[in-house]
Image: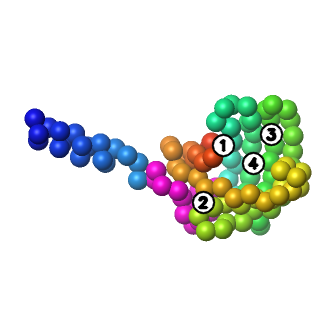
Amino acid sequence: MKKMIIAVCAVLAFAVPATARNLTGAELQEKLIGKRIKFESKDGQFKGVLRYNKNGKVKVTQSKPERFKDKGIWWIKGNKICNQWGILRDGKAKCFSYKEIGPKTYGGGFFVLKTN
């Protein structure tokens, strides 16, 4: 029985995704920059598409709860991706960390991001 418990614990230890940690700045850049990203708030209230362009500019089109567009700038600061919008958050900058929670799927804070 003791060997069985040790074996189960060993299997479970390897079942936890290695990417359950926050992505590094380099990983954020590799996985998010230049890609079309669908986003949805964890409560399902907000949905849309955004793109972090390689030139440091970012665009968002929100489709839910109402259609809305904005653009701004992005940068990597440590292991976080930061953005500053023209209208959203009254133009205040904010930084976010993300974890890989599935294939091409990243979670952090309020939103889940999916890349193509």
Q: Residues within 10 Å of mark 3 (few under 14, many from 20)?
A: some
- Tell me the distance, in whole angstroms, between the alpha carbons under discs 4 and 1: 15 Å
Q: Residue at x 17, y 44 (%)?
A: 6
SS for dot 2: helix
Mark nearer the N terminus (1 vs 2):
2
Query: Which range is magenta?
Result: 19-32
Q: How far apart are marks 3 and 1 (CA)?
A: 15 Å
Q: Which mark is residue 28?
A: 2
**Predominant secondary structure in magenta?**
helix
Q: Read off the residue under disc 1.
A: 110
Q: Is residue 17 left or right of residue 8?
A: right
The residue that mark 3 highlights is 62
* Residue 59 percent location from the top left of the image: 81, 52
* Amino acid type at mark 1: Phe
> Is residue 88 shown in magenta?
no
**Residue 50 visible (yes or no):** yes
Q: Residue at point 66% right, 43% down?
A: 110
Q: What residue type is labelled 4?
A: Leu
Residue found at x 68% / y 31%: 44
The reply to whether the C-beta atoms of the residues labelled 2 and 3 are less than 8 Å apart is no
Image quadrant where residue 68 sits: top right
| N-term-proximal mark, 4 vs 2 | 2
Disc 3 versus disc 4: distance between alpha carbons? 8 Å
Residue position marked by numbered label 4 in the rendering: 50
Badge 4 or badge 1: first in the primary sequence:
4
